[in-house]
Amino acid sequence: MTEPRRAAPQTAEAGPPAYAIVVPTVGRPSLSTLLDRLAEQPGPPPAEVVVVDDRSHPDAALAVPARLLERTRVRVLPGFGRGPAAARNLGWRVAAAEWVVFLDDDVVPDRRWAEDLVGDLASAAGSVAAVQGRITVPLPKDRRPTDWERNVAGLETARWITADFACRRVALVDVHGFDERFRRAYREDADLALRLRRAGWRLASGRRHSAHPVRPASPLVSLSAQRGNADDALMRRLHGRGWREAAAAGRGRMPWHVVTTVAAAGAVAGAAAGAAASAASAASPATRLADGSGARSRALAHVAARAALAAGGAWLALTADFTLRRVLPGPRTWPEARAMGVTSAAIPPLAVFHRLRGRWVHRGAPPWPVPVRAVVFDRDGTLVEDVPYNGDPAQVRPTPAARTSLERLRRNGIRLAVATNQSGVAHGLISTAQMTAVNQAVEDAVGPIDTWQVCTHGPADDCECRKPRPGLVTAAAASLGVSPMECVVIGDIGADVEAARAAGAASILVPTAQTQRHEVAEAPVVAPDLASAIDLLLSGDAR
């Protein structure tokens, strides 16, 4: 039996529990409504609000209300479009409060939300990892809800959703946060809940309330939602056949989608076979009289036609039933019925396709966190002493423990890469040949490197490879045949950490005299020297 985990008890003398708020966002207009509401809250303010801008290519900075800035510290961090799970991980890792409250950017907390939140946290037993808020979805009062509105309304009864979810930071550390392989806002919350419970923590429901308005969506939104079936495949891989019951996720319609898709495929195959048989029966009269193939072809065409008719009838009946189940509870307008008819025909094969895709992609998925398979090193200041714009191999001096550290990694089967900015080439201070000679001298000093990734652009070139952009890290991962999340970047300045974050890799900062104080404060993992960084990595604490 798993021993229940416990956090340190909260004493009355310590005051109300300290909490930080983390908001992943893709820049929806509703974000300003949420931040305004947080600024209006009575009661103890959060220690800070961390907004993670998860847009891939932001065209403008996110606005933060002045009233909120007067109330508490607010940080806006780039999330680089890696999905809500990765954005939440970034947020809680930089927040230092005892509790981390995750809010979606489209919820509207109640007027007394902060006061109720503090009550929820103060009453949580030490074995409680997380306290979920209560979600209300406002629906139209003058008509029946549409299919999309009913789907969103399901949040009211869903368990362990992160729309309003407070979690102890120590519990998040215990299970390594959210699994970043869930790239959509789907199932990442259920996965976290199951892992927390498996680790011995309990989950509770609180008193605080937040509204979750239904945002506008395309009539075809249900088609894009079928991508979630790939996430269901990952859930089954990680948690077994009974994951739906454990997560209170409901049975779903996948068995019916499979039957409907098979019926559709049977109708198409039967029609094709019938057409081929009919074509064969129309062969030359001499051939038909000689071997009787015409009669056989006609019989085959007849059988194929009947099979196609039966399969087509089954498909039509199943699709009509699915359509009615979606139309009848709704407003029963023509636009809604038309959308339901089109999407009900397309959903089953899409759902089956994404489920099969998910099973293939995640066929060997290990538990989270994924193991480290590669390390991407910065060159200057990390592997060798920093000599600005060095073009002389004779000036290469390895840092202490560089060679022995890399040998430890090789013995553990971990691939090695170097990712380095060399703008001296762009500035004309060194030649490409000189840079290559220095790189070879580095390799002679520390041992073989599996792949070198070098950016020779200058800062003004606005390239995608120069750190802190992710190009060098993603190129190194691709060259080694691993995913970026299976990599750890080790460097000495904030640009190395930011490049890792942008690529989806973990990072360890090893400060030097060139490292700025704020870079150390903002790095998720810091080691005093290279040997200690390798100790952290091999012990599994690099994340």
Image (cartoon, rainbow, N blue to C red):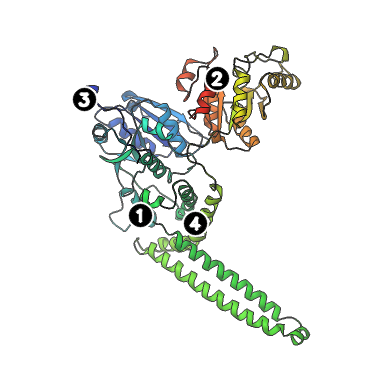
Q: Which mark is residue 150?
A: 1
What residue is shown with label 3?
Answer: 12
Neighbours of disc 4 within 10 Å: few (<14), some (14-19), many (20+): many
Q: Earlier in the sequence, mark 1 or mark 3?
A: 3
Q: Nearer the viewer, mark 2 or mark 1?
A: 2
Quadrant where the N terminus is found in the figure: top left
Cα distance in 3D space between marks 1 and 4: 19 Å
Q: Earlier in the sequence, mark 3 or mark 4?
A: 3
Q: Secondary structure at mark 1?
A: helix
Neighbours of disc 1 within 10 Å: few (<14), some (14-19), many (20+): some
What residue is shown with label 4?
Answer: 351
Cα distance in 3D space between marks 3 and 4: 52 Å
Residue pictured at 53% horizontal, 28% vertical: 538
Residue pictured at 60% horizontal, 76% vertical: 304
Q: Nearer the viewer, mark 1 or mark 3?
A: 3
Q: At label 3, which amino acid type do we have?
A: Ala
Quick check: marks 4 and 2 in contact, CB under 8 Å?
no
Q: At label 4, which amino acid type do we have?
A: Ala
Q: Earlier in the sequence, mark 3 or mark 2?
A: 3
Number of numbered discs: 4
Give the x, y percent position of residue 214.
36, 48
